[in-house]
Amino acid sequence: MSHTNIRADLGLRPVINASGTMTGLGASIVVPEAVEAIRAILTEFVEIDALQKVASSVIARLCGAEAGFVTASCAAAITLSIAGAMTGLDLAAIERLPMAAGLKTDVVIQTGHLVGYGGPVEQAIRLAGARVVPIGQVSGCRTFHLEGAITENTAAALYVVSHHTVQHGMMSLREFAAVCHAAGVPVIVDAASEYDLRGFLADGADVVLYSAHKFLGGPTGGIVAGNVDLVRAAFAQNRGIGRGMKIGKEGIAGTIAALEAWERRDHAAVRRREQDIVATWQAALTDRTGVSTRLVADPTGNPIDRLEVHVDPAGAGITAWDLSDALAAGQPPVIVRDIEAELGYFQLDPCNLHPGEETIVADRLVAELDAARIRTDYIATPLDKRRNRRDEAIRAWPG
Ligand SMILES: *Cc1c(COP(=O)(O)O)cnc(C)c1O
């Protein structure tokens, strides 16, 4: 079957993604260079380790690293790089994991970095057979917490850079790395969604991890980059626990192509287009009762601004979360970034739109707000009920 409209062919809803890069929506629009590389390699045999060596040199060049490789996902990259820090190149230990007797097993992490990205980061650590050692509190973490937690059983330290983490009171990467390095502990940075390919290694990370399918617009995959000994030890896990997280030739070739496209991309032009999209949305929502908007910079400094839409139910006749649900339920479905909807707002993210979709999003917003205004009842689903819905959905899948 030739798919000119694969979503319709499969009976899937034509969702428009105004939420950013979300695994549950298929991550990102894969760039044409990666699509072409994937198509070209799918029917060929290759020597995978040689293909990974090509990936290593491209990753090294772009990240300012000694070496790198491609994994199934950033979550897999966390597990494999922790495992590598535990086993080194001990092939017998690699086969024994997640049983870790005789190895260093502790992984220190600031409590405010214990996030979830669809699964808990803490579990990605434990999958290697490691023990999670949270340090400090959600409200703050200081040098003494880290110094006091490092022992001779410490295998690695994990530092998470993400909008999900607590954004105040945490140690800077430089400070964190200085303490770890003084004690001989390697620092692994989870920078899954961060556009900056070089800054974290420059600031003291020994290994940095990215998602291939987020800002890079690659296929589903993860990138490990950094110190050659640690990268090699993580790569060697492909003969152990990494087997269940394997990446195929298409994922590796597609990630190489996405990285090279990233190197050549006119980033300023992409930024301008995204600013135009956000301006379109802001204009559409001007002077609407109960609605106010503001541009917000990305919390971790990625070069992207989102439109925050505040919804006052008294004026709009609907809560922020019910508006989000109405947009997702309607035609065509529009998915907004509603992680913080209980606070009365959601965000519109311009990074994953096809040309012209911004107008559809604006029209849908206006239509849903108009519909809420003419209703006599006030739409306010209890938050607990809404929150539990996703849990109920997975328990009921496939329906
Ligand atoms: C998305 C994300 C991950 C998981 O990345 P995948 O490549 O989807 O496995 C891990 N950490 C953070 C901070 C993320 O944002």
Image (tube, rainbow, N blue to C red):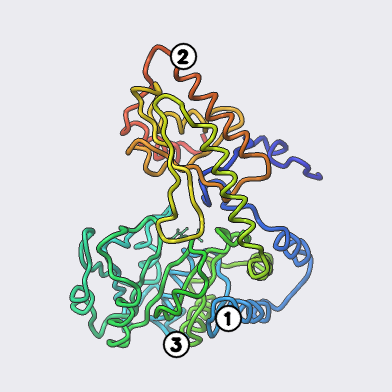
**Label for residue 90?**
3
Q: Residue at x 50, y 20 (%)?
A: 370
Name the residue carrying label 2: 374
Front-most of 166 and 45? 166
Sort mark 3 into few (<14), some (14-19) or many (20+) by Cα contacts within 10 Å: few
Point 44% across, 61% down: residue: 301
Amino acid type, label 2: Ile
Quadrant position of the N terminus in the picture: top right
Q: Secondary structure at mark 3?
A: loop
Task: Quickly name the residue at label 1.
Answer: 60
First along the sequence among labels 1 and 3: 1
Give the amino acid type for the residue marked by disc 3 in the picture: Asp
Seen from the viewer's position, the closer of residues 252 and 36 is 36
How crowded pointer 2 is (Cα within 10 Å; few <14, some 14-19, many 20+) is rated as few
Report the mark closest to the observer, 2 or 1. Answer: 2
Left-right relation of 251 to 95: right
* Ligand 1 within 8 Å of the CB at mark 1: no
Q: Quadrant of residue 280?
A: top right
Residue 83 position within the rendered picture, expressed as x and y whole percent measured from the top left? 42, 76
> Across the whole image, how many numbered discs are drawn on residues?
3
Q: Position of residue 190 (x, y in %)?
A: 43, 68
Give the foreground label among 3 and 2. 2
Q: What whole-number distance in Å separates the C-alpha atoms at marks 3 and 2?
A: 69 Å
C-alpha distance separating marks 2 and 1: 58 Å
